Amino acid sequence: MHIIDRTDDRGPLKSVDVYARRMLIVHRCSAGENVAEIAEFFRSNPEASKATGGRMPYHFAIGRGGRVEQAHRILDISPHAAKFNLEGIGVAVVGDFRFDKPTPAQWTSLVDLCHVLRAHLYGPRAIHGHTSLDGASRDADKVCPGPGLDFDALRREAEEMAQRELWEHGIRA
């Protein structure tokens, strides 16, 4: 997996200590196909801008073709999940998973990204959907990312990837 650096150049956000990052929070996003388009939507759409202060809310975005772009440093506090912004890393997957499933390329990139972040951020990180966390959205009726994104499979595949990596290094978990 290759991650394209598109980190926000409009000045730094507040940062948090790496140990505060306890979870990965996955979102659906239909506001664009890449970081530039998504960021523009949150800058120019009055309702979205009000919610995010005009900032790109997600740390990472995964396009339909599986391209992974990074919009913020992982220690930056971005406005993606209300009361979980301090402890969560926001991952947006382009599409609407209330009705669809991620493309195979998106799925592979999402599993890879979740594995890499969990493996290299000082211990396992829980993987959650945005609205599976109580208080993560100000909209009580919001469904994000939706039933088309299978979190049990995502967690299982990310864990299996970690186990294979350990095994390849001769380490038994």
Image (cartoon, grey):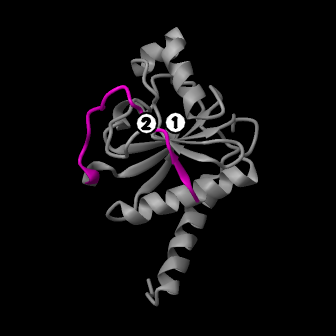
| Element on which disc 2 rests | loop
Percent of width and height locating residue 92: 56, 39
On-image quarter of the N terminus: bottom right
Q: Residue at x 53, y 56 (%)?
A: 113
Q: Name the amino acid, label 1.
A: Thr
Percent of width and height locating residue 54: 43, 18
| Element on which disc 1 rests | helix
Query: For residue 121: magenta?
Result: no
Residue nearer the viewer, 29 or 5:
5
Percent of width and height locating residue 97: 69, 38
Dominant secondary-structure state across the stretch colored magenta: loop
| Alpha carbon separation for disc pair 2 and 1 | 7 Å
Does residue 159 lie above or below 166 as drawn?
above
Residue bearing the label numbered 2: 134
Which quadrant of the figure has residue 118?
bottom left
Q: Residue at x 66, y 58 (%)?
A: 108
Residue 85 is left or right of residue 42, and the answer is left
In the image as oriented, which residue stretches furthest toward the top?
46
Give the magenta range.
1-18
Residue 25 is left or right of residue 67, and the answer is left
Dot 2: within a 10 Å radius of its alpha carbon, few (fewer than 14), some, or many (20 or more) residues? few
Residue bearing the label numbered 1: 131
Percent of width and height locating residue 90: 46, 41
On-image quarter of the C terminus: bottom left
Q: Name the amino acid, label 2.
A: Asp
